[in-house]
Image: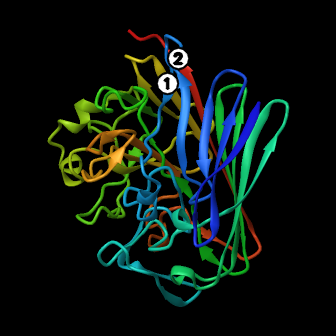
Amino acid sequence: MKLVQEQRTEINGQPIIAFTLANDHGMEITCLNYGCIITSILVPDKNGNVENVVLAFDDFSSYLTNYPYLGAVIGRVAGRIKNSSFQLNGKTYKLHANEYKNHLHGGEKGFHHVIWRAVGFSQKEEVGVRFSHRSVDGEEGYPGNVDVQVTYTLNNQNEFIISYHAISDQDTPFTLTNHTYFNLSGNVKRDILQHELKIKSDRFLPLDHEFIPTGEIKDVAGTFFDLRLGKVLKEVIDSTDPQIVLVGQGYDHPFVLNTHHDEEIVLCDRESGRALIVETDEPAVVVYTGNQLPNEETINGVPSRKYLGICLETQALPNAVNYSHFPSCILRAGEVYLSTTKYRFCVVDGK
């Protein structure tokens, strides 16, 4: 196991540090203390070629805006909050509106723009980085001081584990996710249209015209959202399903998970032989097929375009703070928020 730290640049005199975690089998992960951004995950294909399977900007300055939230931790609340407001304990809170009239991914200065305190650690069978940050009362309109820890750990089973820990001194909405875009072809040789996605989910959330859940929880049976046996993404993206068309020909939808820490999400690229298995204790995963990726950026040395990567955002249901029939995303004062998502990489039969 190996841990390397390197200063990449600085912002207002604060160093931006890249941490590279390496296990004994050639898998490496590089992440930054800025936004806890993951810039590289190197894993072998079926022929042993080690390549990057996540999207990253070529120029660090692009992360200062980071419109697509590449590789970052998202908080305080992942997803959209309708009309940038919610009621809690008899009081109405108004959040910063950063997507038209709605609040998206924690607001203008969400966790993806934080320079986190970071400490690396290395042990016999695992290596990692522990990031910490205090989100102060009133930040982006949220109540309470929240102390947050995000831990990235790599082990010798080619498992990358993200663990979240937080505690607040007031009741507050809170659900974190990671917004890494995966492309298992390696070094973005191809887009994700031939990737296969399988999810153990019987239900999904339809969206309104602002991409916010309508409040309905719909059965996947007979729809392009039935991924229980897996689908090639091109089949979905080429469909005329109104929900697929709505978000720009693809997914940007929450799937309610049937099970947890049970290989509930599997992404596979048969040509490279790479597979990614995602396990979590979160109630849902938001699948985003990169339908709105901007064209003006350069990512991994190629021009950015639609379908260059896919996000698998494990989290609470979006806008849960405004729907009483959704599982609550309220972190109560003094209670501990704990969540873990594991990403395991392996090689499968390419046929």
Q: Is residue 309 left or right of residue 94?
A: left
Q: Label 1: state its secondary structure.
A: strand
Q: Residues within 10 Å of mark 1 (few under 14, many from 20)?
A: many
User: Are discs 2 and 1 less than 8 Å apart at CB?
Assistant: yes
Q: Residue furthest right?
A: 124
Residue 141 locus on image (x, y percent)? 52, 83
The image quadrant of residue 278 is top right
The type of residue carrying mark 1 is Ala
Q: Is residue 71 above or below residue 21?
A: below
Q: Label 2: state its secondary structure.
A: strand
Q: Quadrant of the C terminus?
A: top left
Q: Residue furthest left?
A: 240
Residue 45 locus on image (x, y percent)? 49, 18
Residue displayed at 27% across by 48% down: 291
Q: Is residue 134 left or right of residue 179?
A: right
Q: Say which residue label 2 marks.
A: 347
Q: Say which residue label 1 marks.
A: 275
Decide which of tag 2 and tag 1 comes sooner along the chain.
Answer: 1
Q: Residue furthest bottom?
A: 91
Residue displayed at 50% across by 17% down: 49
Of 326 and 133, the residue lying toward us? 133
Residue displayed at 21% across by 50% down: 248
Residue 315 seen anywhere in this rendered image of the structure: no
Of 171 and 125, the residue lying toward us? 125
Residue displayed at 23% across by 38% down: 237
Q: Is residue 274 above or below residue 125?
A: above
Q: Is residue 240 above or below residue 63?
A: above
